[in-house]
Image (cartoon, coloured by chain):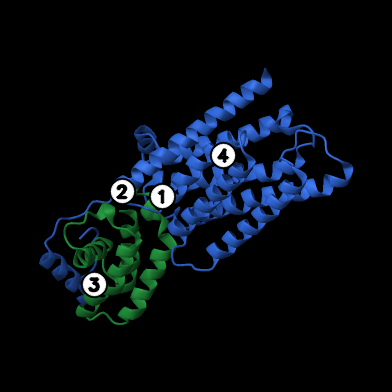
Amino acid sequence: MEIINILGNGLANKINISPPAARGLIKLSIKDEVGPFKPLELINYDDLKSTIQNSLKARLKNLQIFNAEKIISDLIDILNKNQSLITMAGV
Amino acid sequence: MEFNLIMIFVLICYLLILSTGLFLFYRMLKTRLYNLFGLAMFFILFTLQYFIQQVSYLFYAIISEIALIFLIYFVKCTFYKEKRIAFPIILISLLILKLIDLILRLIFQFTVPESDMILISEIPFYYALAITVSLQIIISISWLSYASLNVYNRIKVQNIEPWVKKRYIIIGISSIFFGLNGFILPFIPIGAGFENPFFTTLVAITIFIFTFGNLIAWIMPKKLREYFNRNYVPITEDFLSESELMEKIKSQLAGGGINGNN
């Protein structure tokens, strides 16, 4: 899913981990948020927004990431700017 | 003969855009991307208005307005879901323009383009109507075009599948051509209507580029996707358990280093 790649790159840059690890962290957070049975292809903007604001934020805090609030706000900004990828790459 | 050929060509374009609309409706149900409803309905109503304009102006006016509202609704839900100001401003502008459009048409019984001659004293009112019609097209389609090309400019250097980038650029550019319709309409001579071969051909070409562009962008054949992706190396993921992944992240955070795909 292209939007996860973009968010993964953004997160990787901010907390200095590799993009695959960042994508993995986002996918785990999605699973936390929407449950294990919803396929990634059916994830929409609202799912991603609540994932970032809730489960990803919680995971970043558990990892004791400094400035998690700012990182979450930046990721929401990245999501808003690229939200159309969910549709454009999903059809 | 020439005119009939152009009209058959335009009819084929409308059928293409109808099939794109029906395809998007099907994909909306399949993918649950409900924002596609706006675009699917725009394409379906866009075709319907072509047939209805011969029957009833009132229905035509209502359907063409609803079609444009569906279009801007799609742009809002797809590109600017969190922005609350642009959509109401554009919606109110469209409604005001449509109101002026309706009043002028009801008073003077004009059509745009006008195929009958009109009184000299009515000419300013005709051009006022032509401009309101043009602005409705330009405002709504420009928003789609701007949104698509804006995102394309941002993502063109990112590691995203090239066919997705092409979809943005095809939609953006084909929408510019459709928007050109808005600039052409006021220049069609009064009394000529769509029987003026030059302007009719011009309008037919812009509609063809818009409909064919959207057909290709949305119902992109697999071969074409593969062609666009020919130099693209897909991202591969390692399959790690949750605990393995978290360990890896902790190790990278602790200064264990970032190692390529690990």
Q: Are marks 2 and 1 in contact (CB under 8 Å)?
A: yes
Residue designated by label 4: B49
Which mark's residue is nearer the viewer, 4 or 2? Answer: 4
Q: Residue at x 73, y 50 (%)?
A: B131
Q: Chain of mark 2?
A: B
**Gap in angstroms between the C-alphas marked 2 and 1:** 10 Å
Q: Quadrant of residue A47?
A: bottom left
Q: Chain of mark 1?
A: B
Q: Residue at x 72, y 47 (%)?
A: B106
Residue designated by label 2: B31
Pick the residue in front: B141 or B122: B122
Residue designated by label 3: A55
Q: Are marks 4 and 2 in contact (CB under 8 Å)?
A: no
**Gap in angstroms between the C-alphas marked 3 and 2:** 24 Å
**Image location (x, y in percent) of residue B30:** 30, 45
Q: Is residue B86 left or right of residue B108?
A: left
Q: Is residue B244 left or right of residue B166?
A: left
Q: Label 4 amino acid?
A: Gln
Colour chosen for chain A: green
Q: Label 1 amino acid?
A: Leu
Q: Label 3 amino acid?
A: Ser
Q: Chain of mark 4?
A: B
**Gap in angstroms between the C-alphas marked 4 and 3:** 47 Å
Please tell me how crowded label 2 is: few (under 14), some (14-19), or many (20+) other residues with Cα within 10 Å. Answer: some
